[in-house]
Image (cartoon, coloured by chain):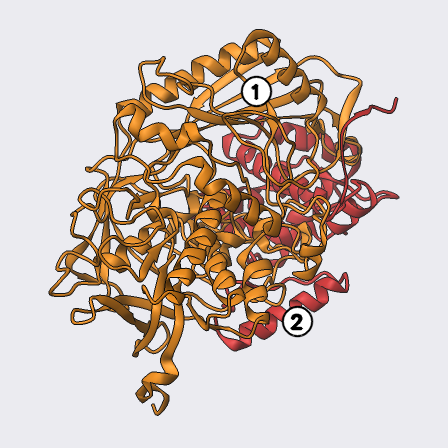
Amino acid sequence: MEILNHAEKRTYGAIVIGSGIAGGWAAKEFCDKGIKTLVLERGRKVTHNEDYPTTLMSPWEFEHRGRLTNEEIAANPIVSKCYAFREDAKHFMVKDAEHPYIQDKPFDWIRGYQVGGKSLLWARQTQRWSQFDFDGPARDGFATPWPINYKDIDPWYSYVEHFAGISGNKDGLDSLPDGDFLPAYELTCVEKHFQTEMKKHYKDRHVIVARCAHLSEPREIHYQQGRGRCMSRNLCQRGCPYGGYFSSNASTLPWAAKTGNMTLRPDSIVESIIYDEKKGRATGVRVIDANTNEMVEYYAKVIFVTAAALNTNAVLLNSKSHRFPNGLGNDSGVLGKYIAFHNYRASLSAEYEGYLDTKTEGSRPTSGYVPRFRNVYKQETNFLRGYAAGMSAGRGSHSDQNSVGESLKNSLLNPKLNANWYAGSHMMGETIPKETNQVRLDPTQKDAHGLPIMHMDVSYDDNDDKMVQDFIEQFTEMYTKAGFKNIRTRDSKQAPGLDIHEMGGVRMGADPKTSMLNKWNQMHAVKNVFVTDGACMTSTSTQNPSLTYMALTARAVDYAVKEMRKGNI
Amino acid sequence: MRMSSRRDWLKGMTLAALGTVAFYDLSAKSKPTSFSLSIAEEDTLNRWIGGIIPESSIPGAVSLGVPVFVKTMLKDCYEPKAQETFRNVLGQIPSLYKGDWSQANGPALEAFLFELENGKHGADAKKAMSTLKGLTIQGYVTSEYVMVNHLNYQMAPGFWNPCVPVKQ
């Protein structure tokens, strides 16, 4: 108890709430700049390699060969919908009973509570935003205008790409700017065929290999992190023994730790941020120990809230004071509102009856990518914004399983190449942030730690439905023009949330009356609090968002430290 | 996470790294991992699985331990009703077979398995055969022996050739 009574021992230069993609970057940047930093993580400790229990397991070592048991599915109707919640990675995902929430409308909230957060589990796709994406809200009249432009974030994209290690080609597309890339993984021959056909039939439909956070050819900076080349295992969700893909655990957190400036405190659930009315600033955080439920306070000059989009909203909504009765910094009333996500509902599969004398060998950790082509330069459809898409084509194999006995055995031991190449695409659609899509705290119901349970009131709208329809029509046309056969389309109608790209609620904007954060991700009303995870997003565009969180975080820390040194915060 | 289970994980990691087949339970609870059967039922199951993928110069499903996998899956991943149907059919198999089931093998056993598959012995038997064949194939092609010796299993290929000629 003695330590609890010594406030100075619990005082830091910076507090970072959360250790996922954004929190890990905040930790690294503060520590590199010599700031004593406390990183609070609500989940358990997961140390790179030491705590990846399944990473070296072969298929035969899994009791159920990867499958979930009936008991697990029954106990986890939400998280079991997620593709990564399987026998090999389920220990990195929050079980339904562990942190309940209320679905005012269907919402699948997929979470990773551990050191590293979802950076262990992410899909590692890292496409930059372009100016067209930042222009969206202002041009099309939704949400509120972004307070930053592409040129503000461009150098910070390069900065984080260099450290994280991003593989890709310089494709020269204005809708998807190039970056500081490691060598790209190549497209397959049928993907290249699709690429060529799209060029032939359309002016603006490009097929590229998706940029991804994998070390195709590590540089010195990656060796310094203790990371090595990606071996294309495609078992990333287990944690990578080589550090072949970027995660907080493999990269930013050990880097921050090496500086001697980081204190990492797992099992620490932030209850709220302490606001001092006399000082007019936040002075620290109240933390609940996840194991004992004991409350401890920590203090710092600056606080970064990077708890993952919706938990960041929850922390701020729960940080009530006389000055901010509706949540910290919430003078505008927009906190918790304008939640948006990515629309992943539609997909397509097809076959190609060509290149039959070829196949692939080995493996790659990415796929093809079709950047957004709808409404890029001007509004041209009956829906706002557009979608990017994945695109991949491979030559699988199969065994005839119609027989039994020796003949079945021979067939299983000698698989045959499939007659055709199989290809597929899925949409990644921008959704329009709306005031009615919101999260709020229940006034009476509490979780096991005494924290208010969150309500999710988020849904699709007509714009999303029209976009699903358009993806299906356009991609059917594109695959048809490229000569593919047996084209099948699907609308999964999956609930929002399962895309695991939830964003907003603490949006950036130039006007304090309609936004929470300024152009530096700094709270308009509380200058020493910053939000740089998905919660800060004013709109969503179509790109997988993590790279943008990394860049915004590094940029915001740079600004915050300069302001600290000037004595402004 | 309890410390004892952490130790088990680390132990498992070490065994896995050494290439030893190690099953360990990530849910850290001790629980039976088998679909418990009588000795007679075990014998029937083994003969049935052995008929689907028999032994020869190349090991078959039984010697590669597939029956343990099948029982684990039936117990943990199938609904009680499906388990009951399977168990009922399992009990009937020796009497459905024309001849001495304890000696069943070769073409006669294969012919019987085709009959089960084609529904000649009823819908439940057809369903049970389909379930068992699926699990037997899955257990067999994911066994260490088959993956390493026949299916060119590479956990970490470390290379990517996007377009290579098919060898004739």
Nearer to the camera, A60 or B11: B11
Residue appearing at x 31%, y 14% in the figure = A382
Q: Which quadrant holds the C terminus of chain A?
A: bottom left
Nearer to the camera, B78 or A201: A201
Q: Subunit of mark 1?
A: A
What is the number of callouts on the image?
2
Residue appearing at x 56%, y 32% in the figure = B126
Q: Position of residue A396 (x, y in %)?
A: 69, 28
In the depicted structure, whether residue A119 falls above or below residue A19:
above
Q: Farthest residue toward the front? A: A566
Quick one: SS at disc 1?
loop
Per the image, the residue denoted by label 2 is B11
Per the image, the residue denoted by label 1 is A206
Q: Is residue A57 visible?
A: no
| Lateral position of residue A65 relative to residue A566, left or right | right
Residue appearing at x 50%, y 17% in the figure = A488
Q: Farthest residue toward the bottom? A: A2
Determine the colour of chain B: red
Q: Splitting the image into 4 quarters, where does residue A523 fall? A: bottom left
Q: Position of residue A4 (x, y in %)?
A: 33, 86
Q: Which quadrant holds the N terminus of chain A?
A: bottom left
Q: Subunit of mark 2?
A: B
- Label 2 with label 1: CB-CB less than 8 Å: no
Q: Position of residue A415 (x, y in %)?
A: 76, 31
Q: Which chain is orange?
A: A
